[in-house]
Image (tube, rainbow, N blue to C red):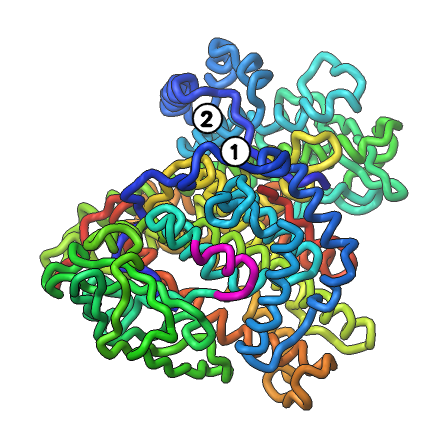
Amino acid sequence: MTPATAATSGLDAATTELLTGSLREVLAHSPDGSALGDALAELGWDDVLADDQPGATTLLFTEHGRALATSRVLDTVLLTELAPSLPPPGPGPRVPFYPRGTAAPVAPDAPLAGLLLGGLDDVAEVVVPVAFDGRVALSLVPADLLAAVTRPAAGFDPASPWLLVDGPVAGLARYAVPEDASRAWDRAVALGRLAVAAEIIGVCAAALQLAVEHTSARVQYSRQIATFQSVRHRLSESHVAIESARSLLVVAWAALAHPDSGVGAARLAKLRAGWAQAEVTRHALQVCGAMGLSLEHPLHRHVSRAAALDALLGGHRALTAQLGAELLTDAELDPIVEI
Amino acid sequence: MTGPTGAPAAAAHPAGPADSPRAGGPLAEDLDAYRLAVRGHLATEPAFKTFRARRYPSTEARMADHARLERLLYDAGWNRYGWPPAAGGLGGDERHRAVLYDELAAAGLPVPGQHMLLETLGPPIVRFAPALAAAYLPAYLRGEEWWGQGFSEPEAGSDLASLRCRARRDGDTYVVTGQKLWTSHGATATRLVCLVRTGTPESRHRTLSMIMIDVDTPGVTIRPIAMANGDNELAEVFFDDVVVPASRLIGAEGQGWAVAMYLLQFERAMYAWLSAAEALRRLRELRGQLTTRAAAGQELPADAAPRLGEAYAHLVALRARSADTVRRLAAGNTVGPEASVDKVLLAGAEICLHDLARDLLGDEFLFTAQTTPGTGDDTDDVAQWRTDWWFSRSATILGGSAEVQRTILADHVLGLPKEAKP
């Protein structure tokens, strides 16, 4: 892998501020993301993306996370990357399938286990990565075949529109596109991981902000509780966790700019964002006290969304174990970052 | 083992080398060319081989051997980049130094122990005492001398601004009286860079001055402090009416706190990067030791893989953050309180790595006595991890404790209401 040497950002500060404001407004009024597509078109998002994919993607998904939005904009990130490996789409929309665990392609004969970011009602085909003889093929599975083995994924996160896919689907091989899509799938997962990492960072930043506001306002023992050292230090550690995830995200985008590298860096960025959400939500829940556990306080929504996003495209614990196992065999300890 | 601790890192003066414009050949201008040149030389020059995975029975032995490594790097020119020609350097900036540390680590070589304090003491001397830098820095780069950092005192640890070691002006000299404690490399250094009081203690940080004192000056007494690992990494230093020329001041009288804050930027940026480079080399060595054991049929603990992955991820995250800070410093930006993030990450990575070594080496770490120090057998490797484990515990103490860093972030980055005063 070619080490990343510098961050790239084509968006200047003024443009970033403008776009951030617009996105916040849209997402605040349309948390389910239904207005997001039109709003992005209006902002000329394709041009923004073409100009600065890392900056634009990070901005969009950070705001998406901050707003706890539930759109399927992540589907677009993966599908755009997979499109060259697929035949032109038919009349109905396509969505990607998100394998559980470490997001490895599924075995052709095993039951499907994974997630979809929304319902299948308007969907024609689901793009499922299948492992054949060490290669990845993309199967275009008719949505109604999958519908039989899906159920709502709104467990820990009641606001989630996701679907859990869990059960046998016959004939995955039959719908496979013959082309070897190994590289396309790896890149799609890598891009998806960077988007989700940004989204987790957005959720965490919002959670930390809630915790800072709560502890600065809440008085006990005649003092704001944010004047207690133990509370202050938990909030500082949350900040460190978020900032370290941010730094790695920038590095991973730079690494992915090279056509043949960056997949490992993207996994690390996702891993560290997932780790950050564990830290931040643990600390935020503690310092917000019983209020943070109540339904009326918004913190719980951040906690459950962050946990769900961590599980998407590889949870931090699963990725850490996978990475460690590779390092114990023969993988190089890639420095990833250079000056 | 000390550092200014009671305040956020903030420069009183813009960062930047003292000489401008820079002299130097093409490598001073072209960082990638420098990188490749260093890499090629370290890989092919046989003289470096003996420094790979070498273990030492004591700090003194390690420093003496590392001085030889420094000399090799000096003769090839490599550790002169990043320093101004007026101070024995060949030009370039902080990034050259950072690249050197990375390339040494990638080649399986240690960063000379001397460079740890060179990174914190060198820049303020170049910036605030160019004559001293011209006189002594070249010898430092050649491995002929190195300096200790005399900041902490028995009653001034985290609360550095309460220090009491006094320097009284007497004509062209200062007369220094008092004590320093936890002085890094105090037992082997040629000179000590000390923060001393040139006014009343009540004035706290406003009447501090920084001054360079030769250890062989009459009245200086140094007592090494054996750390828990047996190494004399630190010392306590007594000053009994020690006469020091006023020309040894670093910055003006009373400017000591500002100089210390300037210094702190390099501690946060360069020292963190150097340490991260070293830690990655050590993680690579640990991985090698573990796979060797696994290949010999020894069973590794069940959580070996996830913990190895965790340590590596932590290190790469630190590198990502630190690289950005180093670049900002090299670009002349002030590295302020936000650099406490780097410091917290560094401490976390160091603790994670060394706990990993302790736990995965298990009984060997805890119970295997070293047979003959320095013979190069496998027990040397385990003994080195034990030594390093103790040193790693200082990561949350030296240069501003873990508590101080979190307080800086709470005050100056998160903007939380201030902690209640007792």
A29 or B250: nearer the viewer: B250
Q: Which residues are magenta?
A: B135-145
Q: Which residue is mark 2?
A: A32
Residue at 13% over, 65% down: B201
The answer to whether B130 is drawn above or below residue A189 in the figure is: below
| Chain ID at mark 2 | A
Marks 2 and 1, how far apart in space?
A: 9 Å
A49 or A51: nearer the viewer: A51
Residue B407 falls inside the magenta stretch:
no
Image coordinates for residue B11, horizontal then vertical, percent: 31, 44
In the figure, residue A20 lies in which quadrant? top left
Mark 2 or mark 1: whose residue is earlier in sequence:
2
Residue at 75% over, 14% down: A90
Q: Is residue B22 left or right of residue B126?
A: right
Residue at 55% over, 63% down: B143
Image coordinates for residue B205, horizontal then vertical, percent: 19, 57
Name the magenta segment's main secondary structure: helix
Give amino acid for label 1.
Pro
Q: Residue furthest front?
A: B171
The answer to whether B335 is drawn above or below residue B207 in the figure is: above
Local crowd at mark 1 within 10 Å, few (<14), some, or many (≥20)? some
Quadrant in which the C terminus of chain A appears: top right
B229 or A18: nearer the viewer: B229
Image coordinates for residue B53, horizontal then vertical, percent: 69, 69
- What is the secondary structure assignment of the residue under circle 1? loop
**Labels 2 and 1 touching (C-beta < 8 A):** yes
Give amino acid for label 2.
Asp
